[in-house]
Amino acid sequence: MNLSFQTQAGVLNVDIRSLIIAGWAGRDRDAVEHHIEELAALGIPRPSAVPLFYRVSSQQLTQSAAVQVLGAESSGEVETFVFHAAGELYVSIASDHTDRKLEAHSVAFSKQACVKPVATVAWKLADVAAHWDELVLRSWIREGGRDVLYQEGNLASLRSPQDLISGFTQGKTTLPAGCGMTCGTVGAIGGIRPATSFTMELFDPVRQQSLRHRYEAEILAEVE
C-alpha cells in the first residue's frame, strides 16, 4: 500500500508491503491482563501468547479521513505505527480499528475485517527514541455531540518498538524494508465501545509536538 507522510525533511512516500499488528504489547503484565479482561467481557478469548504478531493485509491501510465499516460493532484504538523506509525507521500513528463482534469468534479475522487508518505525518524514530517512554498516546470518540477522552497513557506502559521488532524478527534490530508494525495500545477509559468519529494523537512532551489524525466511520448495513 502506497502511503505518503510529511516529515521534517519533506514528503516521504513509502510502499508498505507487509503489515504486522503487535497484540498484547504491554510492558506491565497487570495492564496486559486488564486489557485481556476488557475484551473477555465482550466474549473475546484470551491470547495464546503475549505478545502476538498478527499478519494483516497491507491493503487495509488508509490515510483517508473517511472510512466504511460493516455493522455497528467496530471500534478504533490508537497505536504507534513504526515502519522502515529510506534506510531507517519512522514512527507515526494508526488506529487498529477492529470488528468486536467478529473478534469474539477470531481475533485474527476481526483485525483483517476493518481498514486501519494511518496519520499523514511521521517522525524519525531516532528523534524520539531517547525519550520514547515519555511520549503519550491519546484518543477521543464522539459521544453525545462532543469529543470524549477515550484513551490516554504514556509509552512506558508498552513494550518498546525495538523489543517488539526483535520478537517478530527473531533478534534483528530493524524491520524489513516496506514493513510496518503497530505497537500496542493503552486501555479504554470507561470500557471498549463503538463510535463513528475517532481522533488519535501521539504527543511528545519533550519537543512539544503532536501527531494527530481524525477519521469518520460510515456504518454499512449488515445484509443477510
Image (cartoon, rainbow, N blue to C red):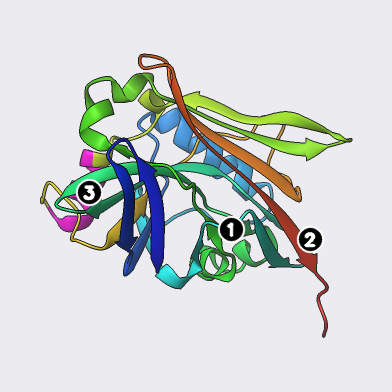
Badge 3: few (under 14), some or many (20 or more) residues near its Cα, within 10 Å? many
- Give the amino acid type for the residue marked by disc 2 in the picture: Ala
Mark 2 and mark 3 lie on one chain; the one further toward the N terminus is 2
The magenta segment is 162-170
Q: Mark 1 points at which residue?
A: 64
Do tag 3 and tag 1 residues touch (Cβ < 8 Å)?
no
Examine the rendered structure and indicate whether residue 112 appears above or below residue 149.
below
Earlier residue among tags 3 and 1: 1
**Image height check: is 150 above or below 110?**
above
Quadrant in which residue 144 is drawn: top right
Residue holding disc 2: 72
The numbered disc on residue 165 is 3
Q: Which of 144 and 110 is in front in this view?
A: 144
SS at mark 3 in the image: helix
User: Which quadrant is the N terminus positioned in?
Assistant: bottom left
**Taking 167 as reference, is 28 left or right?**
right
Tell me the CA gap for discs 3 and 1.
27 Å
Q: Where is residue 91 in the image (x, y as percent from the top left)?
A: 33, 41
Q: Earlier in the sequence, mark 1 or mark 2?
A: 1
Q: Residue furthest bottom?
A: 224
Judged from this view, the residue extending furthest toward the left is 172
Q: Nearer the viewer, mark 3 or mark 1?
A: 1
Q: Label 1 is placed on what type of residue?
A: Ser
Q: For the residues marked 1 and 2, what is the alpha-carbon distance in whole angstroms?
A: 20 Å
Residue 42 percent location from the top left of the image:
69, 52
**Residue pushed farthest top?**
206
On the rendered image, what quadrant is the C terminus found in?
bottom right
The residue lying furthest to the front in this view is 10
